């Protein structure tokens, strides 16, 4: 059974940075996508970024492109989201998500398509406020 544990959320001022981490256990396939969704109060959940493990290609939503960077450490089974130039509108609960439906995942991140499946972590709160 897949188990995802996020960490690294917190309170940061606008313009600041945070790095989220997600450690994966219980999953052995080499062909999947892993990344991050977020959900702000009163809003639908939004795909933020993902990485396709078979080739390392990365994908970002327009709202975070150029500010966020996703990376992974295969030896540690961990994926990271480096968030720079944070804005108040980045405030949300961030979820680590793993899914083998790679086209669906990429569509969710790049085009905002709904994400109806996948394995989700418990979420970590990110608050951007002065």
Image (cartoon, rainbow, N blue to C red):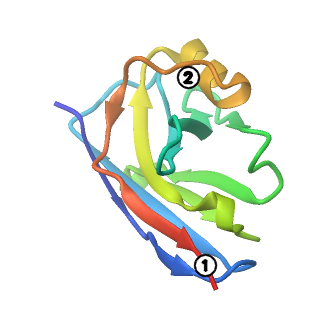
Q: Residue at x 23, y 34 (%)?
A: 2
Q: Position of residue 36 (x, y in %)?
A: 51, 44
In the shown orientation, is residue 123 left or right of residue 106? left
Mark number displayed over residue 57: none
Task: Depth check: give the residue in front, 67 or 22.
Answer: 67
Q: Position of residue 17 (x, y in %)?
A: 65, 76
Report the residue marked by disc 2: 105
Q: Disc 2 vs disc 1: which is toward the camera?
A: 1
Q: Residue at x 42, y 47 (%)?
A: 95
Classify 2 as above or below 99.
below
In the shown orientation, is residue 13 left or right of residue 102? right
Classify 33 as above or below 74.
above
Number of marks: 2
In the shown orientation, is residue 116 left or right of residue 67? left
Q: Position of residue 30 (x, y in %)?
A: 43, 26
How many other residues sit within 10 Å of disc 2, few (<14), some (14-19) or many (≥20)? many
- Quadrant where the C terminus sits is bottom right
How many other residues sit within 10 Å of disc 1, few (<14), some (14-19) or many (≥20)? some
Q: Residue at x 52, y 41 (%)?
A: 35
Which residue sits furthest front?
42
Q: Position of residue 29 (x, y in %)?
A: 36, 24
User: How far apart are the two marked residues, 2 and 1, measured between alpha carbons?
Assistant: 30 Å
Q: Residue at x 50, y 36 (%)?
A: 45
Identify the element where label 2 is drawn. helix
Which residue sits furthest left?
1
Identify the element where label 1 is drawn. loop
Report the residue marked by disc 1: 129
Q: Quadrant of residue 116?
A: top left
Classify 129 as above or below 106.
below
- Quadrant where the N terminus sits is top left
Task: Depth check: give the residue in front, 72 or 83.
Answer: 83
- Of pointers 2 and 1, the one earlier in the residue sequence: 2
């Amino acid at each position: 059974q897949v188990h995802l544990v996020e960490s690294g959320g917190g309170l940061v001022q606008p313009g600041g940075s945070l790095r989220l981490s997600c450690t994966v256990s219980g999953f052995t396939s080499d062909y999947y996508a892993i990344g991050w969704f977020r959900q702000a109060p009163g809003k639908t959940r939004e795909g933020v970024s993902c990485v396709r493990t078979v080739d390392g290609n990365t994908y970002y939503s327009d709202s975070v492109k150029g500010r966020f960077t996703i990376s992974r450490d295969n030896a540690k089974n961990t994926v990271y989201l480096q968030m720079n130039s944070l804005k108040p509108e980045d405030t949300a609960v961030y979820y680590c998500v793993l899914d083998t439906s790679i086209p669906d995942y990429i569509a969710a991140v790049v085009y905002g398509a709904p994400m109806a499946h996948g394995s989700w972590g418990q979420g970590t709160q990110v608050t951007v406020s002065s």
